[in-house]
Image (spheres, rainbow, N blue to C red):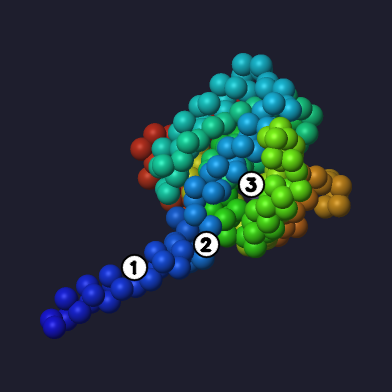
Amino acid sequence: MSRSIHLLVVCASALSLAALSGCRTVPISGRQQFIMKPMQEETALGLQAFQEECKKEVVSNNPLYTAALRSCASSLVQVAEGGESYDWQFVVFASEEQNAYCLPGGKIAVYSGIMDLMNNEAELAFVVAHEISHAIARHYGESSAWGSVTDLGGQVLKSINPDSAASTLYDPLVKYTVNLPFSRKDEYEADLIGMILMARAGYNPSAAIEFWSRFTEGKEQSALNGLMSTHPRSVDRINAMRANLPRAMAEYNAAPQKKNYGMQL
Ligand SMILES: [Zn+2]
């Protein structure tokens, strides 16, 4: 067997083994991960949970916030490696809560309470890109907590009357998926991928550090909720973002269209 053919056979074997065991490479970070559940399961649960959330929350009618989210989301999904097949949906909820989240499969909500703290579209682009990163890095699928969520779903299924309303089933699932803590590793990875994505979409990645410094300033870790409560210490996180900045700035300098800080908020 020639060397090149032999190499081809080795590669093909490695690829089929990877496909069988659910190995994949996280876009941009290049980290190898192992996922047992098929993507369709994540997507279906994410969609159900999102629909339930949309029924409970009030969608914001703030035209500036809606336009800013639409603008940055449309640019970001174009550069979201690995998210080409996702059915992305983005919504602003009218709430004082200072939070944003992503459900599996690419359903992203930003609360107006966190947008009130933003100076410009680039800061929003970072928060949205961070959430997009959780989706394309498949952090839900990877986390062991995901197993608990689906197990919980099974327990609920067994315990309820099959004729019960779907919302009875999905209420606890929504609670766990929306509040599901990511690991520190996932948060650092979502920050890195998010900064690269925003830069590729033409937003100045310095805005990520500016926003995060302002958002966390003076807040005790224990007093932070939602977006922050499960995240690494803010000072460690900002230091990690600073370390990401040269790589992100190189991407920004190479971006075909520059929006810099985008529209003012
Ligand atoms: Zn996160």
Which numbered disc flags the more N-terminal residue, 1 or 3? 1
Viewer-closest of 3 and 209:
3
Q: Quadrant of residue 264?
A: top right
Q: What amino acid is found at the position of numbered circle 3 in the picture?
A: Ile
Res 35 label: 2
Q: What amino acid is found at the position of numbered circle 2 in the picture?
A: Ile
Q: Position of residue 112 (x, y in %)?
A: 71, 28
Q: Is residue 77 left or right of residue 101?
A: left
Res 15 label: 1
Q: Position of residue 202 (x, y in %)?
A: 45, 37
The residue that disc 3 covers is 209
Measuring 34% from the left and 68% from the top, which residue is drawn there? 16
Q: Position of residue 142 (x, y in %)?
A: 57, 60
Neighbor class of circle 2 (other Cα within 10 Å; few <14, some 14-19, many 20+) is some
Separation of residues labelled 1 and 3 (CA atoms): 38 Å
| Quarter of the figure that contains the N terminus | bottom left
Separation of residues labelled 1 and 2 (CA atoms): 15 Å
Measuring 79% from the left and 29% from the top, which residue is drawn there? 96
The image shows residue 102, relative to residue 231, as above or below, that is above
The image shows residue 265, relative to residue 244, as above or below, that is above
Instruction: Look at discs 2 and 3 and give the one toward the viewer.
Output: 2
Q: Position of residue 154 (x, y in %)?
A: 68, 52
Which numbered disc flags the more N-terminal residue, 2 or 3? 2
Separation of residues labelled 2 and 3 (CA atoms): 31 Å
Which numbered disc flags the more N-terminal residue, 1 or 2? 1
